[in-house]
């Protein structure tokens, strides 16, 4: 009887594959968080050498903590029925914790470290325990129990980093985050219970694809917000107006390149896969790179619009050129996940940017932004020419193509 009541929380096969309004509401907290991440990156514009590397690493760590919270939530609403009151309460609670993390993020490596860490741990430790209790006697309750145990193991590192000396915060939090990510990759193994391999999980593939695509669009929306806010807050000039237009064109090209064929077929690939959990886990890491690349690129917009012909610095090259290069790499990975191949257009675009990088390091930021726009336009053009002469193809993912075999009762 208890197992039957717990089973009512599971997402039924007839459930809608679309994200609910609650999930879209939940994403609003992460709009704030992504904006704060961009602001921290923009604060590195004057740094060089080790200061730039350390500052970049600190902000990357905070972003990865936020991403883990968001992606876990996406998997929860893909495995459990989001219309159930307990799942809705979990999502709302996670949203509040995410908002606390977003508010603390600008100084999370300084005096606001404790609220950031406590909010993170409330989600990672308390949330899975709530779900495990709600599942009652259902076999799947062991999955959130595993997660809570592993999160409790990394919690002392988070708290020690928050309460200890500032110089130890980065290494302690990096170790804690590594534990959390490795535990997820391994399926949170425990003695006598073993692991719960994510690749064998039953998920709503259409829903998970929808959530990844929405987060990509949220990141693009954040980049548009940066363009508008920065341009409206500076003295108008023809050069700044040109930088504004080029930055918008790059965002539009990122959208076009992402959704050309592979981005549109992600849901189909997950539905066709023999092991959608494995493809979903791989795609999660791909979209982490995609969203991060868009954030980094948006910082480049801010630097160029603010000072289009300033002196070239290592930081602007990292954001203006590095972000789009990372996007192309991640997009190549996505294409392989969907089709089992990589289009030459993205390889060409990446090679061109690599060849131009040494010269761009000596040119003004506006020149670099224009070159990036031209290269991305070339990639989009080659995509269009290639697809114009070919019929639409279906997904043929090589991931999870093998027989799924016996699935764990917890899946």
Image (cartoon, grey):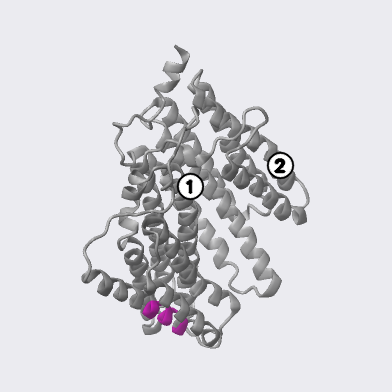
> What x and y, as percent, mark residue 211?
38, 47
Relative to residue 196, is residue 233 depicted above or below?
below
In this picture, residue 12 sits left or right of residue 322: left
Relative to residue 259, is residue 402 depicted above or below?
above
Query: Between 79 and 26, which is closer to the camera in this rendering?
Result: 79
In this picture, residue 371 sits left or right of residue 189: left
- The answer to whether residue 387 of the structure is visible from this angle is yes
Q: Disc 2 vs disc 1: Cβ atoms closer than 8 Å?
A: no
> What x and y, as percent, mark residue 384?
26, 72
Element at label 2: helix
- Which residue does the numbered mark 2 point to in the structure image? 159
Distance between the Cα atoms at labels 2 and 1? 28 Å
> What x and y, as percent, mark residue 109?
66, 54
In this picture, residue 148 sits left or right of residue 17: right
Relative to residue 229, is residue 23 depicted above or below?
above
Tell me which segment is drawn in magenta. 367-375
> What x and y, as percent, mark residue 134?
49, 22
Residue at 44 percent of width and 39 percent of height:
404
- Which residue does the numbered mark 1 point to in the structure image? 281
Q: Which mark is residue 147?
A: none
Residue at 60 percent of width and 32 percent of height:
146
Query: Between 81 and 398, which is closer to the camera in this rendering?
Result: 398
Task: Give the quarter of the figure containing the N terminus.
Answer: top left
Q: Is residue 369 one of those drawn in magenta?
A: yes
- Residue density around tag 1, few if under 14, some if 14–19, many if 20 or more, within 10 Å: some
């Amino acid at each position: 009887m208890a197992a039957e009541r717990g089973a009512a929380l599971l997402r039924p096969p007839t459930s809608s594959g679309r994200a609910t309004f609650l999930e879209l509401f939940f994403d609003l907290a992460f709009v704030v968080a992504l904006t704060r991440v961009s602001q921290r990156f923009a604060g590195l514009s004057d740094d060089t050498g080790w200061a730039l590397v350390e500052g970049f690493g600190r902000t990357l760590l905070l972003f990865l903590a936020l991403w883990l919270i968001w992606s876990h939530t996406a998997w929860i609403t893909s495995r459990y029925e989001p219309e159930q009151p307990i799942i809705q309460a979990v999502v709302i609670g996670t949203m509040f914790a995410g908002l606390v993390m977003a508010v603390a993020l600008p100084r999370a490596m300084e005096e606001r470290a404790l609220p950031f860490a406590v909010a993170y741990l409330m989600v990672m430790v308390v949330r899975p325990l709530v779900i495990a209790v709600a599942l009652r006697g259902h076999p799947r309750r062991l999955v959130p129990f595993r997660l809570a145990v592993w999160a409790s193991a990394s919690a002392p590192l988070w708290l020690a980093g928050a309460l200890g000396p500032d110089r130890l915060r980065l290494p302690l939090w990096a170790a804690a985050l590594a534990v959390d990510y490795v535990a997820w990759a391994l399926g949170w193994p425990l003695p006598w219970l073993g692991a719960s391999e994510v690749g064998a999980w039953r998920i709503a593939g259409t829903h998970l694809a929808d959530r990844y695509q929405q987060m990509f669009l949220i990141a693009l929306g954040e980049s548009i917000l940066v363009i508008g806010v920065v341009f409206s807050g500076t003295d108008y000039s023809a050069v700044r107006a040109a930088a504004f237009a080029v930055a918008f064109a790059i965002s539009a090209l990122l959208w076009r390149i992402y959704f050309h064929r592979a981005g549109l077929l992600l849901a189909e690939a997950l539905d066709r896969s023999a092991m959608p959990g494995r493809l979903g886990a791989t795609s999660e890491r791909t979209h982490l790179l995609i969203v991060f690349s868009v954030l980094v690129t948006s910082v480049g917009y801010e630097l160029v619009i603010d000072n289009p012909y300033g002196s070239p610095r290592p930081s602007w090259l990292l954001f203006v050129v590095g972000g789009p290069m990372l996007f192309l790499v991640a997009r190549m990975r996505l294409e392989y996940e969907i089709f089992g191949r990589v289009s030459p257009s993205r390889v060409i675009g990446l090679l061109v940017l690599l060849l131009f990088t040494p010269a761009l390091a000596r040119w003004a930021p506006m020149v670099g932004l224009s070159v990036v726009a031209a290269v991305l336009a070339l990639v989009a053009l080659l995509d269009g020419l290639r697809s114009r002469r070919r019929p639409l193809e279906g997904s043929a993912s090589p991931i999870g193509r093998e027989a799924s075999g016996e699935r764990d009762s917890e899946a």
